[in-house]
Image (spheres, rainbow, N blue to C red):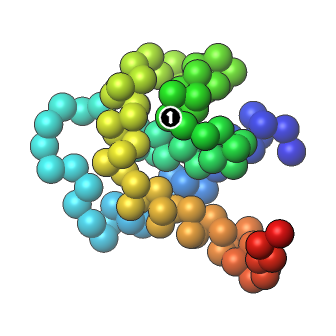
Amino acid sequence: MDRDSFVIAVFLLGCEQYGVIRQQYRLRRGGFEPALTDEEVITMEICGEYFKIECDKDIFAYFHTHHLHFFPKFTDRSLFVRQAANLWQVKAAVQKHLTIISGQSNESYSGN
């Protein structure tokens, strides 16, 4: 699977799981509406980690350079980093779900 297809797949699966989480918990408590959706930020974070991109600065640079056509409102790194930090628990739940549906939760890990 090429990277564009992977990003789209993670986005679609993430949207599905985000909808479930959003029904159970109130995620926004006020403030301004961010330019990026939570689903977009979660997608970039998960894909960035999968692509072995180490820090938020590098995730921003990668997606701004290679995938801006998917995320046209992706213009401010500090807002992205803040939104991503606020969504860490949601991202963890989405990652757990993706691990389960991909079948990787059944694989054993050898710390080599």
Give percent across and percent down for residue 102: 74, 68
The residue where tag 1 is placed is 56
Query: Which residue is nearer to you in this view: 55 or 29?
Result: 55
Residue drawn at the location 39% of the way across and 34% of the way down: 81
Give percent across and percent down for residue 44: 56, 39
Residue drawn at the location 51% of the way across and 28% of the way down: 57
Is 68 placed left or right of 85 in the picture? right
Give the crowd class for mark 1: few <14, some 14-19, many >=20 residues within 10 Å: some
Which residue sits furthest left?
30
The answer to whether residue 103 is seen in the rendering is no
Q: Quadrant of residue 22?
A: bottom left
In the rendered view, tell whether residue 67 sits above or below residue 44: above
Q: Quadrant of residue 65?
A: top right
Is 78 placed left or right of 3 in the picture? left
Residue type at tag 1: Asp
Q: Quadrant of the C terminus?
A: bottom right
In the rendered view, tell whether residue 29 sits above or below residue 37: below
Q: Quadrant of residue 34?
A: top left
Give percent across and percent down for residue 38: 40, 43
Which residue sits furthest right?
1
Give percent across and percent down for residue 94: 52, 62
Label count reads 1
